[in-house]
Amino acid sequence: MGVICISRQMGTHGSVIAAKVAEELGYRYIDGQITDWISSRSGLPEELLMRWDERGPRGFVDRLLDRAFLTHYGMDWGLYGTGGYHDGVVQARLSEMANATYREELPALIEDLGNAGFVVTVGRGAGFLLLDKVPDLLHVRLIASEEQRATVLVERMGLSPDRALALVRRSADQRRKFILDLCQADWDDLKAYDAVINTGLIGVDGAKDLIVGMAKRRQRFPVVGETAG
């Protein structure tokens, strides 16, 4: 079995590359399904859990935004016996409950995926969470310059260059805090990765080929459907 964990900076086409790697190797591709599975296991709305996905500890402004988000969607309906009563304390409690649930469920879910094998995961600290737990782990980081990544967001999301650059920087800060908070690890520690690939230099297909090539050269990474020679 094989487990490939891809850590990516925003704007490096991480999801596209991971999907291509999974398709070529015949592995399962795991990305956005994570919050859906945690929602199914916990009963909390996926929309709320997504607000904690790959984000570090929240500040005061973020907590205010959580309250506005909850009020808009009425996510406290029927919880804690409130009968739909929109109370700031209830909303804050629900937000913190989502945070605690996400952080409690995520490591166990990632470990289950690692033990099952034949999987390519994107983000969520999987490479850090599975370190020393899965013998056939390939942990890859995708990088590119801020300018290149901002350009991707301009083209993909129609943002202004300044807004795209700000989003790229904010995302990096959030993911850095997330890894530190959840895994007690340094997201920028290059020793934590088996390879660091600059997608701004070699593109999507070049990155995919490198990752697939590394996987195939490892004895423990069979390609699904192929038999050993």
Image: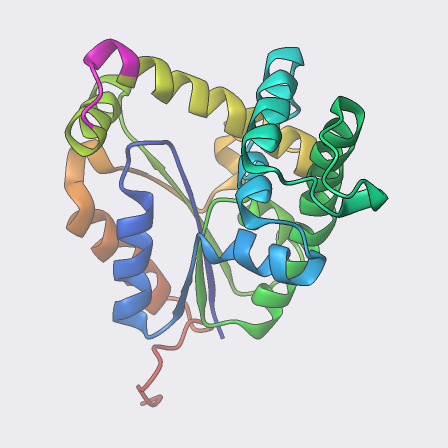
Residue at 18 percent across and 23 percent down: it is 151
Identify the image quadrant of residue 42: bottom right
Does 184 sit left or right of 4 as displayed? right
Residue at 39 percent across and 77 percent down: it is 222
The magenta stretch spans residue 175: no
Q: How is the image coloured?
A: rainbow
**Looking at the image, which residue sits at the far right?**
81
Q: Is residue 79 above or below residue 168?
A: below
- The picture places residue 9, in percent across and down from the top left corner, at 38, 32
Q: Is residue 224 above or below residue 185?
A: below
One can see residue 48 in this view: yes
The front one of 146 and 39 is 39
Does 193 sit left or right of 181 as displayed? left
Query: Looking at the image, how many numbered discs can be counted on the residues?
Result: 0
Does 74 sit left or right of 14 as displayed? right
- The picture places residue 171, in percent across and down from the top left corner, at 44, 25
Residue at 62 percent across and 55 percent down: it is 39
Identify the image quadrant of residue 149: top left
One can see residue 186 in this view: no
Q: Is residue 117 above or below residue 207?
A: below
**Looking at the image, which residue sits at the far top?**
162
- The picture places residue 114, in percent across and down from the top left corner, at 58, 64
The magenta stretch spans residue 160: yes
- The picture places residue 48, in percent across and down from the top left corner, at 58, 40
For the record, the magenta segment spans: 158-163
The front one of 55 and 139 is 55
